[in-house]
């Protein structure tokens, strides 16, 4: 099946043409270059050079762990592949590699869910620790929705960090979408309430809410997020329709731990992995899918508003194993 066909129906913000889908696949491929060169290229080379042996599997496991797939997820993948090899009596390393490839795709696909946009406004809450790339992702999403003819409103719910609201306002101007803001020190709940109100009265299609990544030591971040969600629900009982957790790929297994905490405390519906372009640790996508049991929905591929790809399992795994030119 073509990439475009796979992505079709995955939500309003999926690529609309074959050309758009190809561009995003190319972005995803470029962003995984470091991971491919460092670890997955070596795994592919091992499968080409050696016969299947316990030592080969040890080396592959070590490379997967180094790529930040995580120990548990690596063990799970290798166990699945070895079982299939035993069952099917496989001897050829190339066939074993294809099986690993397939199990990796399956692990990611198992979490995939299409996003339906049935009500108006479609409310998206963006959460994650400070510096993960929340505000940048919001700008990218706003650009994406706007480009699809959607009326977008942003809410500056991070009222804690100095200049956070201004940062979102600047992005709003650059992208060309309005921002509801009360500046620093305001009540994030009031910002969210205002935004929900404004979205209804101005007939917005999509509301995207920025949140703080860090609060005063005595205020619990997870409790604050629950409070925000309750305020949204008071205006719209079935919202937020998406809660996107932003994870910085460069933070490795620490990022996975953060994801666990957020997933336990808030109703995270999907994960955006940012800064994939700056790391060789792209294996984090598998740890997220397997250990957090959430779909990876977006990948941040750079700092510009166009540097975003809708995640596709097959494209991602193909890119990791692609032969270097
Ligand atoms: N290379 C690269 N840089 C990114 C990407 N996404 C975000 N960044 C950069 O990461 C830094 C932090 O991004 P922000 O969007 O401000 O992060 P945040 O989560 O909103 O941070 P706080 O508001 O402090 O909680 C910025 O310098 C961004 O340009 C990405 O996909 N690739
Ligand atoms: Mg921010």
Image (tube, grey):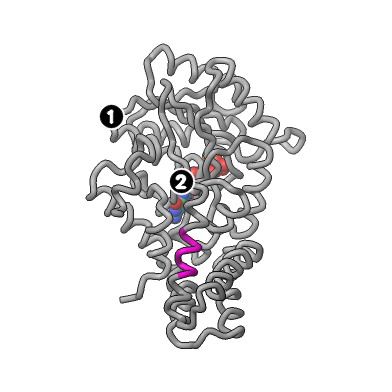
Q: Is mark 1 within 8 Å of ligand 1?
A: no
Query: Most extreme residue toward the right, as rendered?
Result: 218
Is 262 in front, or is 193? 262
Q: Quadrant of residue 151?
A: top left
In the rendered structure, does residue 145 fall within the stretch colored magenta? no
Which stretch appears magenta? 99-105
Q: Estimate the x, y position of residue 221 in percent, counting from the top left.
A: 68, 36
Which residue lies at the image location 49% right of the left edge and 69% below the top edge? 100
Q: Provide the residue designation for mark 1.
A: 149
In space, the residues marked 1 and 2 are separated at their CA atoms by 21 Å
Q: Is residue 102 magenta?
A: yes
39 vs 118: above or below: below
Asked if the residue at tag 2 contacts the one at tag 1, i.e. Cβ–Cβ closer than 8 Å, the answer is no
Label 1 vs 2, first from the N-terminus:
1
User: Measured from the top left, where is residue 2 in percent x and y?
Assistant: 29, 54
Q: Residue furthest bottom?
A: 50
Q: Determine whether, in the image, residue 8 is placed left or right of residue 252.
A: left
Mark 1 surroundings within 10 Å by alpha-carbon count, few (fewer than 14), some (14 through 19), many (20 or more): few
Read off the residue under disc 2: 297
Q: Secondary structure at mark 2?
A: strand
Q: Quadrant of residue 188?
A: top right
Q: Residue at x 58, y 38 (%)?
A: 268
Q: Is residue 202 above or below residue 5?
A: above
Circle 1 SS class: loop
For residue 21, side relative to residue 126 (left or right) = left
Q: Position of residue 11 (x, y in %)?
A: 38, 37
Q: Is residue 263 above or below residue 321?
A: above
Closer to the camera in the image, 173 or 43: 43
Q: Does residue 59 lie above or below 122 as drawn?
A: below
């Amino acid at each position: 099946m073509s990439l475009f066909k796979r992505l079709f129906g995955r939500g309003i913000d999926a690529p609309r043409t074959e050309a758009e889908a190809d561009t995003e696949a190319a972005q995803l491929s470029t962003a995984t270059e470091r991971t491919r060169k460092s670890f997955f290229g070596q795994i592919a080379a091992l499968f080409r050079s050696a016969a299947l042996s316990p030592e080969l599997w040890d080396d592959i496991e070590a490379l997967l762990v180094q790529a930040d797939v995580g120990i548990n997820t690596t063990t799970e993948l290798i166990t699945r592949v070895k079982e299939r090899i035993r069952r099917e009596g496989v001897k050829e390393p190339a066939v074993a590699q294809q099986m690993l490839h397939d199990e990796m795709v399956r692990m990611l696909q198992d979490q995939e869910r299409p996003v339906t946009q049935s009500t108006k406004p479609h409310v998206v809450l963006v959460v994650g620790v400070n510096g993960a790339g929340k505000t940048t992702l919001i700008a990218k999403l706003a650009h994406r929705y706007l480009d699809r003819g959607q009326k977008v409103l942003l809410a500056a719910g991070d009222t804690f960090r100095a200049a956070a609201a201004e940062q979102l306002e600047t992005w709003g101007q650059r992208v060309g979408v309005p921002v509801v803001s009360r500046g620093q020190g305001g009540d994030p709940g009031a910002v969210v309430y205002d935004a929900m109100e404004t979205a209804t009265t101005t007939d917005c299609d999509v509301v995207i809410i920025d949140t703080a990544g860090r609060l005063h030591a005595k205020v619990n971040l997870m409790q604050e997020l629950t409070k925000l969600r309750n305020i949204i629900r008071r205006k719209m009982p079935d919202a937020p329709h998406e809660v996107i957790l932003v994870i910085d790929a460069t933070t490795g297994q620490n990022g996975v731990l953060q994801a666990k905490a957020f997933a336990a405390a808030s109703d995270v519906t999907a994960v955006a992995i940012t800064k994939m372009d700056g790391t060789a640790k792209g294996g984090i996508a598998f740890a997220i899918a397997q250990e957090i049991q959430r779909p990876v929905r977006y990948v941040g591929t750079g700092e510009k508003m166009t540097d975003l790809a809708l995640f596709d399992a097959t494209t991602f795994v193909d890119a990791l194993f692609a032969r270097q030119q």
